[in-house]
Image (tube, rainbow, N blue to C red):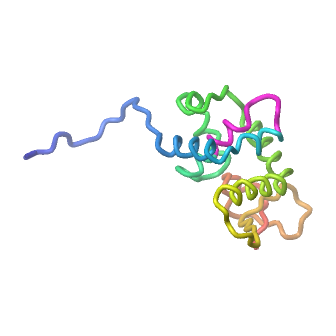
Amino acid sequence: MQTKLRTNELEPNENISFPIGTLYLVKRLYETLNLSPVFGKHKTRGIDINNLLQALVSYKMTDNFSIKRSHEWIYRPEVLDEFNLPEFSERTLYRVLEILGANREEIISDIQDILFERYEFGHTNINMDWTSLVLHGTKAPLGKYGYSRDHRPDKTQIFH
């Protein structure tokens, strides 16, 4: 039985930790649902979109802050290594998200087909909820300054 405190102060060290269980869960579900072809057809050159998306989903399931901060989280050497990613710029991450947005209807349809086939779900309506939209520019009358998940108070944002 412990009868006294071992330390009065915590001392920082160089140990690095991240939730490996979450990373393996994301990888396992990605493989189980065979999502690689769903996303891979939309980006064939450069950094592997599937590895980057798995890292991004892992980040969103753990820290879940802004996309800007996701780059910092993913860019750590141990995370890059875990997802077999080369070093990449924040701009690369935003380009991948633009690709997803531009192809969202097809991607959602493909994922829905996989889920319906695998789990025999009944067909229902899909309701999309976009809770925060960032506006870059000054011409939209709905744009106002406020809280930004990307920590950019200098950019206007549309609130609803």
Q: Percent x, y for residue 117?
A: 71, 57
Q: Residue at x 66, y 55 (%)?
A: 118
Q: Left or right: 61 with respect to 115?
A: left
From what the image shows, is residue 3 above or below residue 52? below
Residue 22 vs residue 93, the one in the foreground: 22
Residue 100 vs residue 30, the one in the foreground: 30
Residue 148 counted in the magenta span: no
Q: Quadrant of residue 87?
A: top right
From what the image shows, is residue 60 above or below residue 84? below
Q: Residue at x 79, y 48 (%)?
A: 100
**Magenta stretch, residue numbers:** 43-56
Residue 117 vs residue 110, the one in the foreground: 117
Q: Quadrant of residue 56?
A: top right
Q: Percent x, y for residue 37?
A: 76, 41
Q: Left or right: 82 with respect to 45?
A: left
Q: Residue at x 72, y 64 (%)?
A: 132
Q: Percent x, y for residue 148?
A: 68, 58
From what the image shows, is residue 67 above or below residue 142? above
Q: Left or right: 19 with respect to 67?
A: left
Q: Residue furthest right?
A: 139
Q: Residue at x 79, y 66 (%)?
A: 158
Q: Percent x, y for residue 22?
A: 50, 46
Q: Quadrant of the C terminus?
A: bottom right
